[in-house]
Image: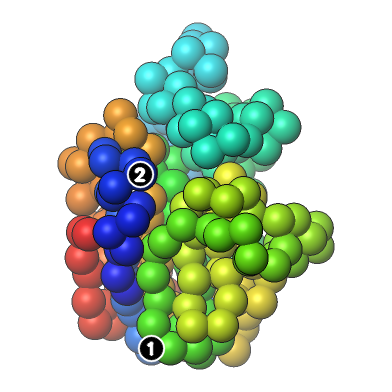
Amino acid sequence: MKLDEIVREKYPNFIAGYVLATGVTVETDVETLNNRLSSVLSEIKAKFAQTQVTEIPEIKAYREFFKQMGRDPSSFRPSVEYLLRKTLEDQFPRINNVVDSCMLASVEHMVSAGVYDLQKVVGELRTTLASPDDKPIELIDGRKLQPLPGEIVLKDDQKILSAYTLGDSKISKITYGTSSVIFVLWNAPGIPRENVERAVESLALYARKYCGGYVDKKEIL
């Protein structure tokens, strides 16, 4: 994956990272991952139980970045905020071991993260900016929405896989036939590089330990 220079020019403090893993096995339930989830989510609940979510500095950073890209964070909630709220409500979403590992690292380190089926990627994968010519994308929940011009997006040679303020495209979602994945991490200005580094290391570990995969490459861009 590459990070287009136009992203840094427009958003100087933006950082991206990724973990590429092959040979993963997608499963509904992995006991060791369940144990890790229980431990980490309990720690997060204890830390933020008495705190207003929108007053947490990391959440403020994501909400401000949404506004900078032209999107109302109260209508389009940042994924990190969504996961944190679900954690505090004892309703952390569970999908499968690959997606759950991604969501865990995201809320654990306060870094926006998505995971994509590499078999559905055509050509080069890059983090870039949306243009007025980009078509609406069908999100995992079925909605079809248009990325805003200048919004950070994840693209291959044919399509958008994810938009910063909208979420992930349905076309590249993880299924039980998925065997190779790429985890993509994006910060917001104000989220330190160390958070992205820790999230990359966690995902490299989780891909091996909970998904049975091999980490072919990991990088901070």
Up-down: is 99 above or below 106? below
Q: Is residue 29 left or right of residue 42?
A: right
Q: CA distance from mark 2 to mark 1?
A: 37 Å
Q: Is residue 56 visible?
A: yes
Up-down: is 206 above or below 174? above
Q: Residue at x 44, y 47 (%)?
A: 112
Quarter of the figure that contains the C terminus: bottom left
Q: How many tags in the picture? A: 2
**Residue 90: x %, y % from top left:** 63, 34
* Residue ID for mark 2: 10
Q: Residue at x 38, y 38 (%)?
A: 188
| Label 1 SS | loop
**Residue 74: x %, y % from top left:** 67, 27
Q: Is residue 60 left or right of residue 163?
A: left
Up-down: is 83 above or below 18? above
Q: Is residue 150 left or right of residue 91?
A: left
Q: Residue at x 19, y 41 (%)?
A: 194
Q: Which mark is residue 23?
A: 1
Mark 1 surroundings within 10 Å by alpha-carbon count, few (fewer than 14), some (14 through 19), many (20 or more): some
Tag 2: residue type? Lys
Foreground disc of the pair 2, 1: 2
| Label 2 SS | helix
**Residue 132: x %, y % from top left:** 62, 58
Residue sitting nearer the eye, 209 or 177? 177
Residue sitting nearer the eye, 213 or 43? 213
Tag 1: residue type? Gly
Residue sitting nearer the eye, 54 or 36? 54
